[in-house]
Image (cartoon, rainbow, N blue to C red):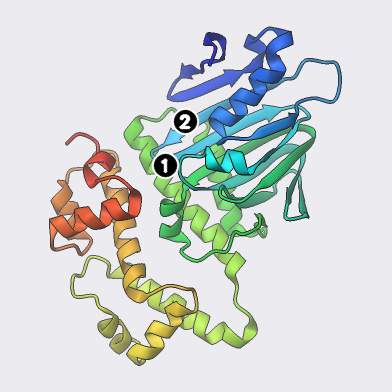
Amino acid sequence: MDTELLPESVAGTERWDVARVAPGDRDEAWREIVSDTHLPWTLDRVRDSDVPVEGRILRRRLGDIQLMDTWCGLCGGQRLRSDLRRTDGEYVGVLVVRAGREVLTQDDEQIAVGLGDVVAWHSARPIRFDVLEPLRKQTLLVPVARFHDVVPSLELTTARLLHPNSARLLLTSYLSFVTTLELTPEAAAGAGNAALELLGAALSTLSTPPTASARRHELRQKVKGYVEARLGDPALSPHAIAVHHAISDRLLYSLFEDEGDTVQAYVRRRRLARAHADLTRPGRDLAIHQVARRWGFTDPAHFSRAFRAHYGYPPSKAAPAH
């Protein structure tokens, strides 16, 4: 990247602004900036007049989660197959529109979004965007492994518009609030964990079951609440869970099979998510093996292997120097 396109670091954030670039170079600069911050994209429309393109992006790193604030004029582009191949890892993107309008197109289906709308999309699927009027938006980029900590089975083969509800309002208000803060790396990681939990609550309404399976859904949610309260108990097992709820082991397994999941995998993911949150929490006073034991992992080596398999890096990389 040219020196003039390098981001400015300001109070824990990175900022890009095409106003720093000569007018004749701004179209190409905007293409490069968008792909450097929002995963690879092919922009085929950067403006609809002779006026030089305008655009700026502010990025905050919330641990391994990224939050981008974008201000831009009329433009459009898509994630082609070549862009998907150039993407390092898989992510779930969450778009929050703060002002303006844009259209997302995927599999010939269009989602028109405006002020207050929230859309979730998957980075591994081709998608197109077209900004219809000057736009201000926030984009949360969450690694898929982290996303599945809170929403293990959400189908995102096409972009999904989140229903308006209190959980969505909490998420969008929180993301707006985070932009006002100067955060240390440790506090930023904690902020990312909080954003992830709020995202999970906001997305849960997308999987509302049909009436015929409402009882199974209610029972499954009870089981998950029970598990959540006892993640630190090494004796937590599928059989113990089934006995507590006065159901058979087979019924318990089938409740999770409804979501393409297993009881053991769900418990392991939630334990790992809690351990990850502890390891990245500001002021952590526990060693890695103590965090593992706190969340039901009695064997540190097993914890380390499970953590690496799930997140792609060892617990020591998630934890600040201790």
Q: Residue at x 42, y 72 (%)?
A: 261
294 and 269: which one is in front?
A: 269
* Spot occupied by residue 201 in the image (x, y as percentages of width and height): 51, 60
Q: Is residue 112 left or right of residue 183?
A: right
Disc on res. 256 = none
Q: Residue at x 41, y 53 (%)?
A: 145
274 and 257: which one is in front?
A: 257
Q: Residues within 10 Å of mark 2 (few under 14, many from 20)?
A: few
Above or below, 316 relative to 3: below
Disc on res. 191 = 1
Q: Residue at x 62, y 18 (%)?
A: 17
Is the C-beta separation of discs 2 and 1 under 8 Å? yes
Examine the image and state in which quarter residue 244 appears: bottom left
State which quarter of the image contains the C terminus: top left
322 and 34: which one is in front?
A: 34
Give whichever of discs 2 and 1 has the lower sequence position. 2
* Spot occupied by residue 262 in the image (x, y as percentages of width and height): 38, 75
* Spot occupied by residue 9 in the image (x, y as percentages of width and height): 46, 18
Q: From mark 2 to mark 1, how far is it between C-alphas?
A: 10 Å
Above or below, 158 relative to 254: above
Marks 2, 1: nearer the viewer? 1
Q: Is residue 138 left or right of residue 288?
A: right
Q: Which residue is the site of mark 2? A: 181
* Spot occupied by residue 303 in the image (x, y as percentages of width and height): 20, 57
Q: Amino acid at mark 1?
A: Ala
Q: Amino acid at mark 2?
A: Leu
Q: Residues within 10 Å of mark 1 (few under 14, many from 20)?
A: many
Above or below, 132 relative to 223: above
Above or below, 251 relative to 69: below
* Label 2 residue SS: loop
